[in-house]
Each structure stands twice: as structure tokens, then as C-alpha cells.
Image (cartoon, grey):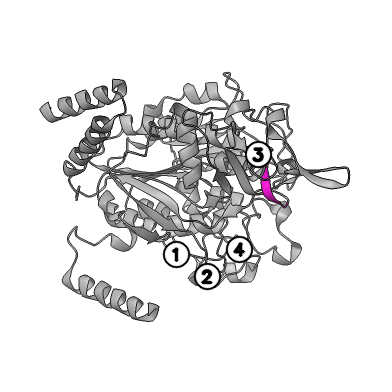
Amino acid sequence: MCRKFILTLLHLHQVFALEDADYWHNTARVEIEEALAQKWNKKIAKNVIVFVGDGMSIDTITASRIYHRGETSYLAWEKLPHMGLIKTYNTNKQVPDSASTATALFSGVKTNSQVVGLDGNVGVGDCEGSLDESYHVKSIIDWAQEAGKATGFVTTTRVTHATPAPLYAHCSNRKWECEREIPKSSSACKDIARQLIEDSPGKDIKVIMGGGRQMLKSNVTGTKSDPIDTWACYSSDGRDLLSDWQNDKAERNLRYKLVQNTNELRNVDAAEVDYLMGIFANGHISMDWNRDTGPTGQPSLEEMTKMAIKVLEKETKGFLLVVEGGLIDFAHHRGHAAQALRETVRLSDAINTTLELVNLDDTLVIVTSDHSHSLMFNGYSDRGSSILGISQKSKMDQIPYTILSYGTGGPNNMAYELKGGNASRIDPSKFNTSDFTYSQQATIITNEAYHGGGDVPIYAIGPFAHLIHSTHEQNYVAHVIAYAAKIGPYSNESSTPRLNDIVIVTIIAVFTSVLAL
């Protein structure tokens, strides 16, 4: 207690102190004290919570931190004691998509781009290959359910979208969310929505929350606040998978609840519900800046996460929960930096609440991203500048440029216009660059801003969080989860490595080093 009090006083001193040499020495001393105080937690993880910021690159995190509370602040996960980097390449692509990266994160197996829950033997659109169960990979949801744990996932995207789908589905094309997208030649394959409701482990997931009504129910209608998602599948085969979900739970005498707006979610008595389905939008949940926050609107990621934990924590053997801030990526694809930063802050809010709710002595919390993006943080703006503002004028054309820009972008991110037959860069200072609908300029114009291939950060706290410690392959994360919770491939492992395991790992490391020479 005394040490914590001293550290608190030092922090308060820093807040009000001049940033002279003493200030920076004291700041570093506090960080050293905090680092020295860290102890490895080698207890078995009763609970595991994984947060994924879709498309949350390092520059996205830095910019969101400044956007939220300035350069000296931290987002919820940035002071977690263990961190590393993840390599995100696919088996066939240097720059990945979300389905393949989520498969790696959640199953421990890297795979091909746009493929869901299958190994590298199956390429995109290979229906026949996807039916071969020897190519199916189990996810952390499978492993947790086999160990008797409650499972759940929460997302701001469609519940059938590329990131959540590998938790429960095996599909050779991430676009096959409903029957309309599957070609007749592949009619033997079941769409992702049906796999969620009809198959294991999907039908045994206790908490499912997000959007995607138009995949689960046929011929739904849109409204001004909840339009039909024209970018995604739209079912018309007469299905009502929401009713099928309810009927399945009723037939098994399970306590369940289906909710479709914020008020209904708030009225859930978590003590009386074991299976909770929340479908709050036809497509993705609305971007936070434009979300209907009223009682008949859509809940925040924080509110969904909080309820999910309340429902799942009743399980005596613990739980596994995956939470996706999926609209960070959605905003980046359209070149809307302001929206991406706000979505990142909302993910931070959900994580802050989680860290207050759970016991970190027996709960492993991991925060990471599935892939990078082409957002760039440019020089040389003054400290304290609005991160969404103007940096300075280019020394070449004397036209200002914004602090944030994109490497690639869609037509709205166009940087040049024709004037008198010559290409001239558009002056961003003539626009409100902080507006949520403003599109930052991009270097290369395609149909949208593309993913980046850079490594993404990973942060962890709780049991065996120290296994996150360097640059890792993306599939390593699922193995850390399984080892910490003693589920799946590590269900029979003790917390102490066996001698033969150490020898095998050493041989592999030496062999890899030789190959690299």
C-alpha cells in the first residue's frame, strides 16, 4: 500500500510539474518501479477475454490516444504489463484479410486469404475442399466448450462477418454469410449463418451479440437508422434462424433471451439467462458517431461487453469471451480517420470496464489487432495539435497537408484535382478535416483504403500473460490462450514445461536458425 501511495504522489507531481530534466527522470523512475513490481502469474486461467481491434494499426492506436486525451495519456490496454508484436501474413498473402487472420488468432493455424476456419489446404471458393473435415481447424471456442467453459462473442460488425466467423464456422469464402452468395456449383456447402445456429460449436455459444439480421432472417426491411447493408449478403430463402435459435434452446430446456435493441438488452436479468442472442442491426451496428443511442437504438460495445460478462461469469468452470471492435477497420476502408479513432476509443471504454469487472488473478485478458491499415501519421505537427488537423505546408507545392493521411484510398480520398490542365493537390485546409465524414487524402487511389502488412501489437495481463513477450507469429496467440487455460491441445499439460518439450523446442529453434543462414 505504501509503495502504491508513493507512486500515486509521483504521478500527481508529474501532472503539475514543469517538463524539465527532473520531470523526465522521475517519470522513468516510476516506470522502472512498476516494471520491477511485476510478478509472473502462473495460475491456470479460469477465464479468458480476447479483444480484437479490427484494422487497429500502431498508428491508429497512437492517433486515438492523442485524439482521446493527448500525447501523455494512455488507452485502456497500453499499460498492461506484457506486450509484443504479431506477424500477420497469410499462407498465400503478405498483406492479409480479416478471415484468415482471425482463423490464425482463434485456431492457432495460419491459412489462406478469405478462408474461414480451414487450414492452408483449402483455397478461396473451394467448396469441395472445405467439406473435408481433416482440413477443419478447431477454435478456442471449441476448446473452451470441450473443457466445460461458457463461451461468447460480441462484435460491432455482423455476427457472421470475417472476424467472428472462424470462431464457429468452416467456410472456403468469407462472403458466404448467407445462401445468396453461394454459387450453385457450391450448393453442397452450408453458409456461415446456418453454421452459427445449427452446428457445433455455434449452437452452444452462450452469448452472441452484434449485427447481421439480414443473414439470419429472410427479406428483412430497412429503416433510416438501420438500413439494409448493400455491401453484404441478403437472405431470401425463407429462413428465420432467430426463431430456430430460440426453438433449439426451448427444446433443450435452456434459459434464453433474444434482444434486438438497447432497452431490451438493459432489461436482461443476467442471473436468469444462460443463452443471450442480441442482434441489433440488419448489417453492421452503426458507427458510434452516428449510432442511435436511444432506448430503441443500438447498444455500445461497452454495454454489450458488460452484459456478456455478467451472463458468462456464472459458469463455475469459467468462460471464454471474444470482443471485436470491428468498425475501426470499416472506417479505415473508407478513409474516415475521425470515425476510426472514435471507434478505437470506444474499444478502450469497453476494455476499461472489463478490467474493473473481472478478477485479473484468474482472468487472462488479451488485446490485439488482426491486421494493420494504411493510415499514416505525418510530420511535423506541434505538440498539442488536433490529431485530425493540419500539419504544415509542403515545401514542394506550398499546400498544407493533414497530420493523418492514407497510403491507399477510395475516390473520396483523392489528393489531386485538375486546374488548367495541370494536376494540383487539393488544399485540405479548405475543409473541416475533423469532421466524421471527411476523407483524409491518400497517396494511391483504388476502390477503398487497403489493409497494411505491418506487424500489429498485442498486450496482455493475467495468468500466463508473460508468454506474450516478443515478436510472434499470429497463430501463437491461440496457443497462449489454450496453454494458460489448459484447454484444447494443452488440456492435459501442467504449468511446468516437460523436459522433452524443452528439448523439442530447442531443436526446432536451432533448425530454424540454420535455415535462416
Which one is earlier in the sequence, the residue at label 1 or at label 3? 1
- The 10 Å Cα crowd at callout 3, few under 14, some 14 to 19, many 20 or more, is many
4 vs 1, front mark: 1
Res. 324 in view: no
Real-space Cα separation, disc 2 to disc 3, in angstroms: 36 Å
Q: Give how far apart the Cα atoms at labels 4 and 2 are.
A: 11 Å
Q: Do labels 3 and 4 touch, CB within 8 Å? A: no
Question: Is 179 on the left or on the right of 151, as rendered?
Answer: right
Mark number for residue 456?
Answer: none
Q: Which residue is mark 1?
A: 109
Name the amino acid type tagged 1.
Answer: Val
- Give neighbour class at mark 1: few <14, some 14-19, many 20+ (Cα, 10 Å): many
Q: Amino acid at mark 3?
A: Gln
Amino acid identity at mark 4? Ser
Instruction: Report the Cα–Cα distance between label 4 and label 1.
Output: 15 Å
CB under 8 Å between discs 1 and 3: no
Q: Residue furthest left?
A: 2
Identify the mark nearer the N-term, 2 or 3. Answer: 2
Secondary structure beneath dot 3 equals: loop
Q: Are marks 1 and 2 in contact (CB under 8 Å)?
A: yes
Q: Tell me the quarter of the image containing the C terminus.
A: bottom left
Residue for point 73% across, 50% down: 447
> Mark 1 and mark 3: span between their CA atoms?
36 Å
From mark 3 to mark 4, how far is it between C-alphas? Answer: 34 Å
Would you name the residue on which mark 3 appears? 440
Relative to 238, residue 314 above or below: above
Residue hosting label 2: 120
Q: Label 1's element?
A: loop
